[in-house]
Amino acid sequence: MRRRELAQTLATSLFETEAAIDAAMERAGLLIAQTASLRREHGLSAVLGHEGVSALARMIDAVGQARGHAMVAHAAFAASAPMIGVQPSTLHGTGVGKPDEDTKPTGLMPALHLVEASA
């Protein structure tokens, strides 16, 4: 397999993975919205299923972190492509433009802070 084909195979798989992560975020967001909507429509207590809704919120955060890691991997592969003689701009992708070079994902998430409930 030529270097260009190797890079395109990897790029295609990476684009598909990024799309799958975005689809997972979309579905998870719809799920959490649906839980709140159905609870209100049926007049159910917020206590009912709260643990499940909290777990969904943590799941969405985890998927968001996975998305950040995928972007870091994407940037790392793009940076290493010239080392094997391939220019990332020649690879076929999603057709979606990218932001300026100054915007680079770090994969680092801000630290969460515990908020005390007020009485």
Image (spheres, rainbow, N blue to C red):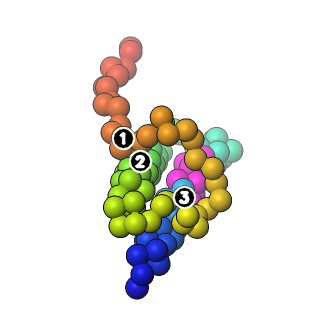
As drawn, 90 above or below 43: below
Where does the magenta region start and end?
A: 23-33
Residue 7 on image: x %, y %: 43, 71
86 horizontally vs 42: left or right = left
Q: Position of residue 35 (x, y in %)?
A: 57, 49
Q: Nearer the viewer, residue 19 or 97?
A: 97
Residue at far front of view: 85
Cβ atoms under marks 2 and 1 closer than 8 Å = yes
Q: Quadrant of the C terminus?
A: top left
Q: Earlier in the sequence, mark 1 or mark 3?
A: 3
Q: Is residue 75 magenta?
A: no
Q: Can you say whether 117 is above or below 72 in the image?
A: above
Closer to the eye: label 1 or 3: 3
Please tell me whether mark 2 or mark 1 is closer to you in this view.
1
Instruction: Find the distance from the CA under tag 3 to the CA under tag 2.
Output: 21 Å
Q: Which residue is tagged 1?
A: 106
State whether residue 106 appears in this view. yes
- Pointer 2 residue: 68
Q: Secondary structure at mark 3?
A: helix
Residue drawn at (47%, 78%) of the image: 5
Of marks 2 and 1, which one's residue comes earlier in the chain? Answer: 2
Q: Secondary structure at mark 2?
A: helix
Observer-nearest of 50 and 91: 91
Checking the image for residue 89, the label placed there is 3
